[in-house]
Image (cartoon, grey):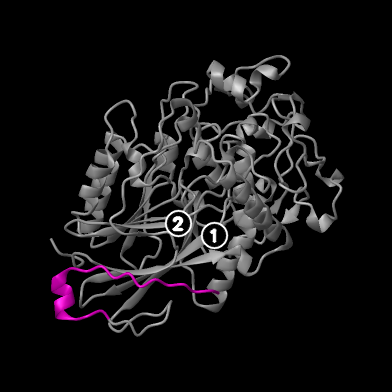
Amino acid sequence: MRYHVIAIVFAFPLLLAGCPFPVNSLPGEPRPGEVHWLRFGVLSDIHLIDEESPARTVRLDTLFSSAWRPQDGYSAHVLDATLQRFNAIHASEGPVDFVIVTGDLADNAQYNELRWAIDVMDGQTVLTDSGAADGAERDVAPEDNPKLAFDAVGLAPDIPWYAVHGNHDGLAVGNFTILRTGGDPGYWRAPQLPPMARLVGLYDMMPPLASLWPTVDVSPAVIEAREERIDPETLQLLLDEAGPGNVAADPARHFLSDTGFVEALFDTASEPAGHGFTAANLAEGTRRYTARPAADVPVRLVVVDSVPSDLSPGIPVDYGVMTREQFEGFVVPAVKAAKQAGEYVIVVSHHPAASFNKPYPGNTVKAFEWRSFLSAQGNVVAHLAGHEHRNRLQLVRGLYSYVEIETGSLIDLPQEGRLLDVYHDPARGTVRLESRMVSHMEAPTRLSAESYRRASIDAAHHKSTPGASSLSELLTGEAAAVAPADTETGNGAFSITLQLKPLGAD
């Protein structure tokens, strides 16, 4: 395990004047006066991808890098190799109390993609070859073939894991609303505006279509498991060789239903059932919950759903939204109830708070109001998020400052997860968070190492050919607004101490 801990200590002057913070401790060890409360893992943006789905937008790869990646077919192997690193820490350094995945388990809101992600977490046999089972025909040695069934190790059975709803779990390619008309999910599709339909090649198909439709037998760019159509040096997709044509249909490619994300998380061999979600979520059609992962530790997760709903067909929206209803009807009561119960809170969403500032119809809560409320409560420790595929720490100042922590993606560099330790000093009334990154490259499998190699080459290629960062930016021309950080670091490792209200205080 490699450590690069940045000592970042935030505190109020009164605390510093009373007693300086001790620094004579090693990573993963409590300082004098502290009690170690929790150690947990954070994963984000796994993007388990059905490469062969006709409902992808790979023709936009020259405009933005996430449309297609040469490492797409290796996402299951990177996830499993990363879970093995958490298992090793759990076995050798002391227990990992839980892992939370902050959204985008799937890439295209497809049932088979989410199923593959859950099966890897569960340690099942996984085959990421949809349509025709042609992966075995790929002209590589079996040990180098990501399109063969493999037995995932999965997360250790005694480590529970929790899930968060991401935009790629609920929207076609993470951007477009899905029309779920009729009872047969094979006919569910995501309509496209004419300019987008032309851009992604839907009009080139026979017959021409105007929807992203995963279960049909034609594709705007035919990609098969048997053969990669890529340049051997740059690893970029040869679009001329991946033109429109017929593909083998697969009913398991269907888009998830409104409750399908939550339903799938109850069909699992690992704990807890529902992975945070409850029967109430299924009955209400919601994707938010609270959970107390360790019964003997007064820390509660408040997990929210930041994925926009009721989008106009064909209009791309990948950014986060905090509705007034969710904020006032769920977030505020949950945080206040935790305070009354003597619990500190870690809020979790897929999108970071700055994403809430983007325009969206209806009454929504912007980042200023969101942060003002959380920083006034005294029991909020952190807001965890993903989505941006970056590691970032930001101090949110207020009466009781807290931190926003973004964790990068497993599909893009640096392909890391995060390990967080939580310490409490009852005498000082402080909570300290200590973070380090967990990389599958510390003990890579053959296929996860190949994914990292490919991701490195792809990142270098796209750095030299910059394009739009998202579909919404492509069509609207509006760049994503990111609020300036009071204090931030792109390094995923840090140690930060927060002065909060003492437990049980009014």
The rendered magenta stretch, by its main secondary structure, is classed as: loop
Q: Quadrant of the C terminus?
A: bottom left
User: Can residue 434 be seen at all in this image of the molecule?
Assistant: no
Magenta extent: 1-21
Q: Is label 2 in a helix, a strand or a loop?
A: loop
Residue at far front of view: 464
Q: Is residue 64 left or right of residue 355?
A: right
State the image coordinates of residue 374 (x, y, percent, origin top left): 24, 51
Q: Are marks 2 and 1 in contact (CB under 8 Å)?
A: yes
Residue type pointed to by label 1: Glu
Residue 312's spot in the image, x, y percent? 43, 21
The mark nearer the N terminus, 2 or 1, is 2
Label 2 Cα neighbours within 10 Å, binned few <14 / some 14-19 / many ≥20: many
User: Along the line of sight, which residue is nearer the eye, 12 or 465?
Assistant: 465
Name the spot of residue 101 as percent of width and height, x first: 49, 53
Please provide percent x and percent y for residue 348: 38, 51
Q: How many marks?
A: 2
Based on the displayed image, in which of its 4 quarters is residue 297 positioned?
bottom left
Q: Which residue is mark 2?
A: 391
Judge whether residue 414 can be spotted in this image.
Answer: yes
Q: Is residue 281 magenta?
A: no
Which sits in the foreground, 191 or 127? Answer: 191
Residue 416: give its label.
Answer: 1
Using a 10 Å C-alpha cutoff, classify the residue at mark 1 as few (fewer than 14 neighbours), some (14 to 19) or many (20 or more).
many
| Residue 9 highlighted magenta (yes or no) | yes
**Residue ID at (52%, 57%):** 271
